[in-house]
């Protein structure tokens, strides 16, 4: 089983880290047998699985349910669970209850978005023996404050703020950082200034690893692609064909054949 020590080791050895999102038992079983390093049960499940326009509707209970399903199938993979919208902004006690639920559902670490106002909490979680992954750049839980899902850190002032945030998160004890949707050059600068690994999404190649939403990777979504959401499979077309093949065989009474029937 990968541990947070391996994240640091991989970074030191210039070995890129691969992470995918996962929301359920059956895909966790497939990922468990793959060579991908680790799994994020991301609150993107609010959009990908539950069909919402943002990650805001995800709750601690929903996240815990999915973490439980994933960790039943994830085998030796290191699993990080997202703390959802507002769950860590209502005081230390409520935040620790959210952390407790995600960890007791089987995660090995939690991820939370942003820095300002979270400093004491991050330190407290780390000092409670729980690994924390930070997340800066495009932080989807703040989509309305950011004015949409857009590239962050495009001017010097914004870039400097992100560099400062990354350094702060390392100092607070985060074992790794997700950096989302920022220019490649800025991601490179941040990565060079840190000793913990950076895991990019829409942040270019000069980072310590990459995370991709599984449903983008498999091409399962029938919607316009993001710039960075590479499809390694046209899953949507393959699944549609399988469904239509089934339908045709049912309509033509070719399914079930004897092979799929109890013919005594
Ligand atoms: O929720 C999520 O899937 C994420 C990744 C996109 C980093 O936070």
Image (tube, rainbow, N blue to C red):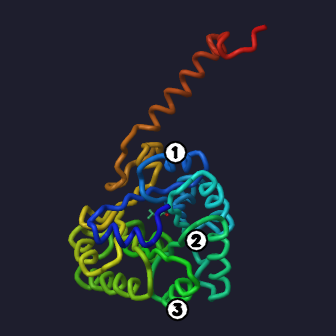
Task: Look at discs 3 and 1 and give the one toward the viewer.
Answer: 1
The kind of secondary structure element at disc 2 is: loop
| Most distant residue in the right direction | 264
Residue in the picture at 33% in, 66% down = 10
What x and y, as percent, mark residue 181? 34, 66
The kind of secondary structure element at disc 1 is: helix
Asked if disc 1 is less than 8 Å from ligand 1, the answer is no
Q: Is residue 98 above or below residue 216?
A: below
Q: Is residue 47 left or right of residue 166?
A: right
Q: Which residue is mark 3?
A: 120
The Cα atoms of the two marked residues, 1 and 2, are separated by 25 Å
What x and y, as percent, mark residue 68? 65, 59
Residue in the picture at 75% in, 14% down = 262
> Mark 3: few, some, or many residues within 10 Å (few <14, many ≥20)?
few
The Cα atoms of the two marked residues, 2 and 3, are separated by 18 Å
Disc marking residue 215: none
Image quarter (top left, top right, bottom left or bottom right) of the C terminus:
top right
> Mark 1: few, some, or many residues within 10 Å (few <14, many ≥20)?
few
Disc marking residue 30: 1
The residue closer to the viewer here, 13 or 174, is: 13
- Counting residues from the N terminus, which is met first, the one under dot 3 or under dot 1? 1
The kind of secondary structure element at disc 3 is: helix
Image quadrant where residue 26 sits: top right
The Cα atoms of the two marked residues, 3 and 1, are separated by 37 Å
Q: Is residue 241 left or right of residue 201?
A: right
Q: Which residue is mark 2?
A: 84
Q: Is residue 241 above or below residue 120?
A: above
| Most distant residue in the top direction | 264
Q: Is residue 167 left or right of residue 101?
A: left
Residue in the picture at 51% in, 31% down = 240
Image quadrant where residue 103 sits: bottom right
Contact between marks 2 and 3 (CB within 8 A): the answer is: no
């Amino acid at each position: 089983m990968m541990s947070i020590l391996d994240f640091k080791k991989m970074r030191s050895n210039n070995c890129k880290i691969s992470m995918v999102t996962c929301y359920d038992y059956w895909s966790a079983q497939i990922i468990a047998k793959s060579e991908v390093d680790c799994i994020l049960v991301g609150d993107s499940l609010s959009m990908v699985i539950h069909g919402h326009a943002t990650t805001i509707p995800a709750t601690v209970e929903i996240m815990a349910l999915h973490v439980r399903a994933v960790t039943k199938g994830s085998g030796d993979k290191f699993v990080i669970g997202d703390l959802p919208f507002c769950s860590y902004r209502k005081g230390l006690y409520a935040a620790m209850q959210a952390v407790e639920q995600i960890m007791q559902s089987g995660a090995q670490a939690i991820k939370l978005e942003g820095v300002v106002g979270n400093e004491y909490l991050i330190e407290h979680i780390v000092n409670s023996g729980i690994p924390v992954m930070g997340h800066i750049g495009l932080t989807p839980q703040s989509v309305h404050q950011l004015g949409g899902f857009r590239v962050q850190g495009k001017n010097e002032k914004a870039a400097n703020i992100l560099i400062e945030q990354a350094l702060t998160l390392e100092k607070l004890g985060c074992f790794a950082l997700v950096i989302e949707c920022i220019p490649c050059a800025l991601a490179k600068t941040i990565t060079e200034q840190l000793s913990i690994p950076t895991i990019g999404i829409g942040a270019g190649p000069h980072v310590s690893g990459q995370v991709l939403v599984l449903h983008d990777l498999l091409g399962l979504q029938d919607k316009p692609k993001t710039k960075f959401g590479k499809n390694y499979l046209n899953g949507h077309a393959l699944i549609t064909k399988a469904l239509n093949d089934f339908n045709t065989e049912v309509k033509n009474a070719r399914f079930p054949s004897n092979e799929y029937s109890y013919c005594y």
